Image (spheres, rainbow, N blue to C red):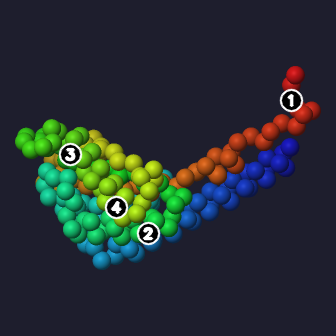
Amino acid sequence: ELQEKAQRMDELDRRLRAQTDAMTSLRQKVADALVNFNAEDLSVSMREGKVYVSLSEKLLFPSGSATVEPQGREALTKVAAVMSSNTDIDMMVEGHTDNVPIKRGRFSDNWDLSTARATSIVRILQTAGLRPERVTAAGRSEFVPISSNDSAEGKQRNRRTEIILIPKLDELYKALEPAPLAPAQRTP
């Protein structure tokens, strides 16, 4: 029994290493695809086993708008091209804002704006060929800042969209499931 558990742990460790290697490789492919864009407008990083593609408002949207600019469309199309061959990865698109209240326009508040921006990006990714069931849109409003909203620079950093590349972990969870009990081990 101990040997069987050790084998399962070894298999789980092997799968975890393979998943980490695959995500590291994916991070590099996405970074390579976006190399011609200004580093101030986007970043690609890995956190907690996921790849984060962070795109500035300046690259994607006019202020207070959810209409993606041509250069932003180009960047999103490049991300979609990389993702089209990585079908075992899902994507969450999170819109983020600063804490300045919306005073007028078509959006009632920052929740509205952040969600509309995420949805606009999801539609572009779908148009570029990604299957809709692989992509989720989420608005985070002002509630997950990466900088203080006390300065113009901090507010600018907070106005961003993050595309989070999330590995499907079905096979990993299967490896965690306990092995079925043999007939002699079952209790009546």
Residue hosting label 1: 186
Q: Quadrant of the N terminus?
A: top right
Q: Which of the numbered marks, if any, corresponds to residue 82?
A: 2
Q: Which amino acid, by three-letter code, is at mark 4?
A: Thr
Residue hosting label 3: 113
Q: Earlier in the sequence, mark 1 or mark 2?
A: 2
Q: Earlier in the sequence, mark 4 or mark 3?
A: 3
Q: Which amino acid, by three-letter code, is at mark 1?
A: Arg
Left or right for 31, reference 118: right
Q: Residue at x 7, y 42 (%)?
A: 104
Q: Is residue 47 visible?
A: no
- Looking at the image, do the residues carrying marks 2 and 3 touch, with CB atoms under 8 Å apart? no
- Looking at the image, do the residues carrying marks 1 and 3 touch, with CB atoms under 8 Å apart? no
Give the number of the mark in front: 4 or 3.
4
Q: Earlier in the sequence, mark 1 or mark 3?
A: 3
Q: CA distance from mark 1 to mark 3?
A: 56 Å
Q: Which amino acid, by three-letter code, is at mark 3?
A: Leu
In the figure, 104 relative to 7: above or below? above
Give the number of the mark in front: 1 or 4.
4
Q: CA distance from mark 2 to mark 3?
A: 27 Å
- Mark 2 crowd level (few <14, some 14–19, many ≥20, 10 Å Cα): some
Q: Earlier in the sequence, mark 2 or mark 3?
A: 2
In the figure, 1 relative to 58: above or below? above
- Looking at the image, do the residues carrying marks 4 and 2 touch, with CB atoms under 8 Å apart? no
Residue hosting label 4: 127
Q: CA distance from mark 1 to mark 4?
A: 53 Å
